[in-house]
Image (spheres, helix red, strand yellow):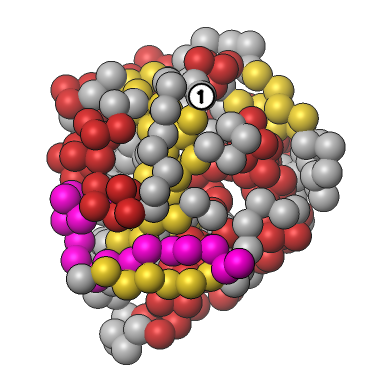
């Protein structure tokens, strides 16, 4: 059976909720809503009002983690101020998962590169997760989508350095590149296992810059908006997004593809499939 990926070219908050419901997997218990709070200065991240209908429907808690690089989100104090400045705490209850240590260690017995993942200890408070991803390029990963949110996104500040360094946090910016990509897949697998697959993924292909929402100075979007995708499979949804970029006839397509290809971005998808957390074979179900 191919994984189902629901897709609409209409990009509205209401359409996000509609596709979430079509996925047919209501999230129960305490639901963590993993999203990107946006680095100060970034103009492309998706704002609270866009996500409001689906978050209110699910009734979860917005979850974030501190970063491992200089900026306005690398300490709990600064990150909470940024979360407030960007409006998240005005709309929602927010939980900074690694606000206080010690980290929770998730074992990855089948990990290809890393055998453990360091995440915010507050993750234990949740039974399921809604992963809200803004699909776009990324300076290191090539692209950012569901797999990045599961891995780098859920990792604590130390955990982010551990993944980037392929198990050697002191090599955060110098580790072998493909080992970093494979470490992201390993870390993503540990979060899928933690929630026993009780996760729904939303990727929104809007405001697509070659740069991530973690960049304070980011390029403006280079390609026309494409749509919203929802799936229960993180591998399938990311593969579908990449395929939609390739299928685009927008003149900005090649600039985004250069970023994805030059960083071997698809390798994270390949590595995640090899770990068994999803399939690159999917059925794209287009909705008006």
Instruction: Using residue 54 as the reference point, say whether residue 64 is left or right of it.
Output: right
Depth check, front residue: 90 or 227? 227
Question: Mark 1: which secondary structure?
Answer: loop
Q: Quadrant of residue 37?
A: top left
Whole-percent x and y of residue 185? 67, 50
Q: Where are the magenta residues, as a range? A: 1-16
Give the residue pinned by disc 1.
Answer: 127
- Residue at the spot x=54%, y=42% of the render? 150
- Residue at the spot x=24%, y=74% of the render? 224
Q: Is residue 142 visible?
A: no
Residue 197 lies within the magenta run: no
Q: Is residue 183 depicted above or below 101 in this figure?
A: below
Q: Quadrant of residue 102?
A: top right
Depth check, front residue: 112 or 159? 112
Q: Is residue 66 depicted above or below 103 in this figure?
A: below
- Residue at the spot x=61%, y=67% of the render? 1
Depth check, front residue: 196 or 146? 196
Mark 1: few/some/many CA within 10 Å (<14, 14-19, 20+): some
Q: Quadrant of residue 48?
A: top left
């Amino acid at each position: 059976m191919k994984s189902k990926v629901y897709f609409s070219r209409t990009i509205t908050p209401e359409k996000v909720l509609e596709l979430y419901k079509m996925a047919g997997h209501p999230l129960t218990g305490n639901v963590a809503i993993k999203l990107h709070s946006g680095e100060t200065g970034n103009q492309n991240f998706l704002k609270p009002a866009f996500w409001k209908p689906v978050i209110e429907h699910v009734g979860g808690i917005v979850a974030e983690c501190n970063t491992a690089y200089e900026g306005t989100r690398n300490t709990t104090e600064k990150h909470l101020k940024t979360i407030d400045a960007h409006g998240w705490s005005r709309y929602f209850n927010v939980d900074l998962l690694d606000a206080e240590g010690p980290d929770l260690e998730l074992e990855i017995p089948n990990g290809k590169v890393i055998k453990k993942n360091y995440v915010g200890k507050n993750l234990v408070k949740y039974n399921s997760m809604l992963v809200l991803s803004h699909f776009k390029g990324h300076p290191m990963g090539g692209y950012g989508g569901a797999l990045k949110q599961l891995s780098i996104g859920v990792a604590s500040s130390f955990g982010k350095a551990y993944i980037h360094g392929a198990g050697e946090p002191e090599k955060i910016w110098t580790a072998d590149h493909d080992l970093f990509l494979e470490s992201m897949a390993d870390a993503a697998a540990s979060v899928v296992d933690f929630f026993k697959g009780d996760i729904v993924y939303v990727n929104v292909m809007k405001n697509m810059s070659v740069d991530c929402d973690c960049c304070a100075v980011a390029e403006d979007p280079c390609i026309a908006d494409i749509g919203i995708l929802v799936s229960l499979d993180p591998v399938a949804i990311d593969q579908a997004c990449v395929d939609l970029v390739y299928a685009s006839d927008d003149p900005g397509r090649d600039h985004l593809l250069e970023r994805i290809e030059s960083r071997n971005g698809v390798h994270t998808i390949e590595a995640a499939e090899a770990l068994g957390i999803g399939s690159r074979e999917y059925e794209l179900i287009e909705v008006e």
